Image: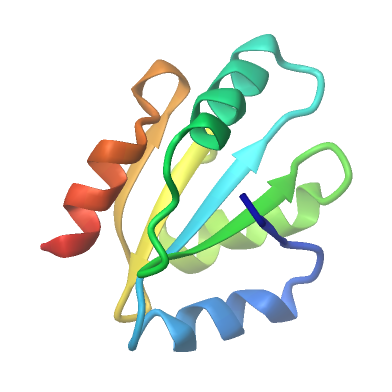
Amino acid sequence: MNWIPLTSEAQLETISEASKNKPQVIFKHSTTCSISGMALSRMNRSEFPETIDFYLLDLKQYRNISNQIAEQFQVHHESPQVLLIKQGECVYDESHYGINMDELVEQSAQ
């Protein structure tokens, strides 16, 4: 899987605009959390559909971006957490053991 690194707040506008044509997923990952590591590993073992762009945010390094995500997409911060962005809005989010590729794919098709 080729994650797109999320390393700047400016990318959030790119994600928002791109979501008008193609679903975008943001995975907020804590490099020091075993649950986050497990969730990321499960995602990496899944088949990634080409119909969705996948961004990976390192929370330890870019906490300011996580804060901006919470504000811009009106979601409560959790870690690990996935957000599905469509039409410029977060239409689905899940955290911890609830992170599941099949559910993301299903939600992206709605």
Q: Classify residue 61 as left or right of residue 102.
A: right
Please report the residue visible at 61 percent of the width from the left and 49 percent of the height from the top.
1
Please report the residue visible at 53 percent of the width from the left and 55 percent of the height from the top.
26
Which x, y percent locates residue 12?
61, 74
Q: How is the image coloured?
A: rainbow
The quadrant in which the C terminus is found is: bottom left
Task: Give 68 or 38, whichever is nearer the viewer.
Answer: 38
Q: Is residue 23 above or below residue 44?
A: below
Which x, y percent locates residue 67?
66, 53
In the rendered picture of this protein, how many numbered marks are placed on residues? Answer: 0
Res 7 visible: yes
Q: Is residue 41 above or below residue 75?
A: above
Please report the residue visible at 36 percent of the width from the left and 79 percent of the height from the top.
22
Q: Classify residue 14 as left or right of residue 53.
A: right
Can you name the residue that lies furthest to the left here?
Answer: 110
Please report the residue visible at 30 percent of the width from the left and 81 percent of the height from the top.
87
Q: Classify residue 39 as left or right of residue 83.
A: right
Please identify the quarter of the rendering in which residue 9 is found. bottom right
Which x, y percent locates residue 25?
46, 58
